[in-house]
Image: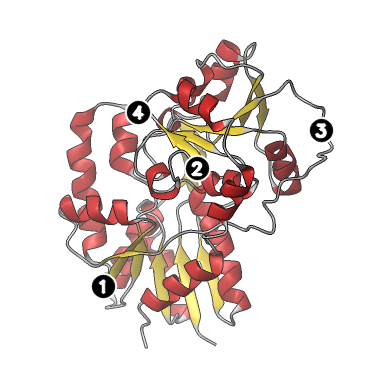
Amino acid sequence: MKKIVFVTDTWVPQVNGVVQTLSVLAAALTARGYAVSIIEPGQFTTIPLPGYPEIRLALFPRARIKRILEKAQPDAVHIMTEGPLGFAARAVCISQCIPFTSSYHTHFALYTRARTIGIFMRPVYGYLKRFHRRAAATFVSTESLKSELEASGFEKNIIVVPLGVDTERFVRNPAPPLPALPAPVFLFFSRLAPEKSPEEFLKLALPGTKLVIGDGPDRQKLEKKYGKENMFVGYKQGQELVDWLSLSHVLVFPSRTETFGLVILEALSCGIPVAAHAVMGPRDIITDGKDGCLSEDLRTAALACLTLSSADCRTKALEYSWDHSTDAFLNNLRFIR
């Protein structure tokens, strides 16, 4: 039985794309007979990330990661994130001559611009390039991101490993056990943080109901400011999430910082069209005018989505399977022996 070790700086109970992707991938690999272990912040002494207390930063993890890898004797190591654990694991692998692969899941350069100012983008890109340069391959989710990183000077193998959606789980419930909402229901489904641009959605003048699924560091401030015109329900998971999605008619996706956007696929799988900007992530998934609308004017795009076919949205989601994603991951993983 081959052993695969993942290293991630974000893990449950956090709710984000990295956690979701790794959870599904680990389960898929286990089902195929691989022994999967995860090095994550809960195994270390941590401190909260300033301004984002949901994220815990591991303190001085290198020695312990070295011991874990020596004991595990993995056949492959994959680093999911570029935080303290990812950096420490990278250092251990380099010092021990262990080949490893990495993922570029989060577009930190754009996050930096969204949260601060653009002058920090260049040093952030510099760090990320140095980080991934020593990986045997770096996995990205779309051709757009592959092209952008290569144009930005990432020198190592950039390989597209597309993400997927559980189309058996994300199926519209025709009669969700929830109170009916005034129609149409426009949905924001993401973290409430600056890089996700929630205020752009919250300010939109739309008919019916504006529903917010998600939580994050800005929730209290945003709910206080926009709570009268928008319905905030917090994080939802499992069937409860599907039930809330089933009340919705359009997903409004204002973020400009995504590398993919898993929530887009989850909405499409439930037959919900997506209004978004024509940026990386949405433009890689959405066929404009068929399963969503891409525009700088999100209000116009959201209203136009009301005329689109739920069946076309579902058909698009069916093109993205986790089996295909797992195949691509395994085909490009670098085994030590």
How far apart are the alpha carbons under marks 2 and 1?
51 Å
Mark 1 or mark 3: whose residue is earlier in sequence: 1
Residue named by callout 3:
178
Mark 2 or mark 1: whose residue is earlier in sequence: 1
Residue named by callout 1:
95
Residue named by callout 4:
115
**Horizontal arrangement in the rendering, residue 66 relative to residue 121 (left or right):** right
Which quadrant is the N terminus positioned in? bottom right
In the image, residue 194 lies at what x, y percent?
Answer: 42, 27
Local secondary structure at mark 2: loop
Label 2–label 4 contact, CB within 8 A: no
Check disc 1 and give the amino acid type: Ser
Residue occupying image coordinates x 71% and y 37%? 244
Mark 4 or mark 1: whose residue is earlier in sequence: 1
In the image, residue 2 lies at what x, y percent?
Answer: 50, 85
Mark 2 or mark 4: whose residue is earlier in sequence: 4
How far apart are the alpha carbons under marks 1 and 3?
55 Å
Label 2–label 1 contact, CB within 8 A: no
Residue occupying image coordinates x 59% and y 82%? 33
In the image, residue 273 lies at what x, y percent?
Answer: 56, 39
The mark closer to the camera, 3 or 4, is: 3
How far apart are the alpha carbons under marks 3 and 4?
35 Å
How far apart are the alpha carbons under marks 2 and 3?
29 Å
Figure quadrant of residue 66: bottom left
Mark 2 or mark 3: whose residue is earlier in sequence: 3
The answer to whether 38 is drawn above or below residue 122 in the figure is below
Figure quadrant of residue 62: bottom left
**Horizontal arrangement in the rendering, residue 249 relative to residue 157 (left or right):** right
Residue occupying image coordinates x 58% and y 20%? 220
Residue named by callout 2:
290
The mark closer to the camera, 2 or 3, is: 2
